Image (cartoon, grey):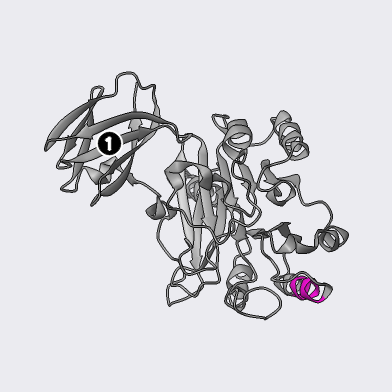
Amino acid sequence: MLRKKIHILAYLLFTAKILFSQTTYSFFVAGHVYGNPGSDSLGVYYKFKNKFSYITSRPEIKFGVFTGDIVRHPSAEAWDSIDADVSELGLPVYFCAGNHDMYNRTLFEQRYGRTYYSFMYDNDLFIVLDPNLDNWNISQPQLDMIDSALSFNNYENIFVLFHQVLWCDNPLYNDLTPNSYEGKDDTINFWTAVEPRFHNLPNNVYMFAGDVGAINNSNNIFYDNYDNITLIASGMGNNSAYENFIVVNIDSEKNVTFDVVCLNGNSQFCCDDISMYDHYIPLSQANTQKQNIIYIRNYLHVLNFKNTTLDVYDLTGRKIITKQINSEHETVFTGTLKTNIYIINIHSTSTNETYKIFIPE
């Protein structure tokens, strides 16, 4: 009898462990919600709407976020159509203002209130920003809101959501193509005023942008991760195989995973792991290729890149090392670099390779 009770107790503990590790809640993020720029339809993009049944089939999805360009031309009729679709979905949906949405700011604010705000859900902090107020800069009242939200310090994960791909000014991302640069100042304050407020916090920070995926040469999805920061851009409308929205899953231990849900094709997901879209080739992959960069004890060993230039950037996009590679095997001293992640770019008229490297202590 005692053995049977022990077996039952072990089974219950095992079952509890499985249940405890399951997703606590999820939410979805959908970018460029009106879809194809060449269409005159109202409401959300029809391919996205076709996925409403998938969203509602997952009871752990508690709400959604539209990351901008929700309507093509803002009018009462257009917003009524959006509201009807959201009502049909049956979940709360938060709006990030896109440039199209702000063609009539007064109408938007009359219907939905302020375009920047924060809220908490299950001890996670959500911050919604409006770069349209100041030509892609985050204006001082929004920076004050960020500081106020962060000052409570009683949150776990942090999610920051906006429309424009604000990190694209960094030369590390010069091959990232958003849908539009409309209204953008020559210089913006993401890397000087926004990102530093979150970088190296004890929390994991996930930043989402939604102005991609609507034009033929735009990225449908972008992913990069460094230190405590994850950058994700996602969108729809260009009829490519990779039109998508993202379901963000938070488990009971506050670990975050992502489902990239495809709008086209037979597969539910665009990939098994969003890190497959990592913007840079990690050195762990580069070292398995013919062209290699190997880090050993304060030196980069550069193989098979003869007659190229090697540049090393920090995460702010500042170039800190440059060296001409003149032979099949060159060494580059990195001993002055602090422990951090760096980006290596090797380029010539016929070569352009970019890698991510972590310099350890």
Q: Nearer the viewer, residue 9 or 113?
A: 113
x and y percentages locating residue 137 in the rendered image: 67, 43
Residue drawn at (71%, 78%) of the image: 42
Asked if residue 134 lies left or right of residue 185, the reply is right
x and y percentages locating residue 159 in the rendered image: 62, 45
Residue drawn at (59%, 58%) of the image: 210
- The reply to whether residue 7 is visible in this rendering is no
Residue drawn at (58%, 36%) of the image: 195
Question: Residue beneath label 1, please?
Answer: 310
- Give the quarter of the image for residue 108: bottom right
Q: Quadrant of the C terminus?
A: top left
Q: Nearer the viewer, residue 117 or 253?
A: 117
The local secondary structure at tag 1 comes to strand
* Residue 102 in magenta stretch: no
x and y percentages locating residue 178 in the rendered image: 53, 58
Q: Which portion, as a residue range, is magenta? A: 77-84
Residue drawn at (34%, 33%) of the image: 312
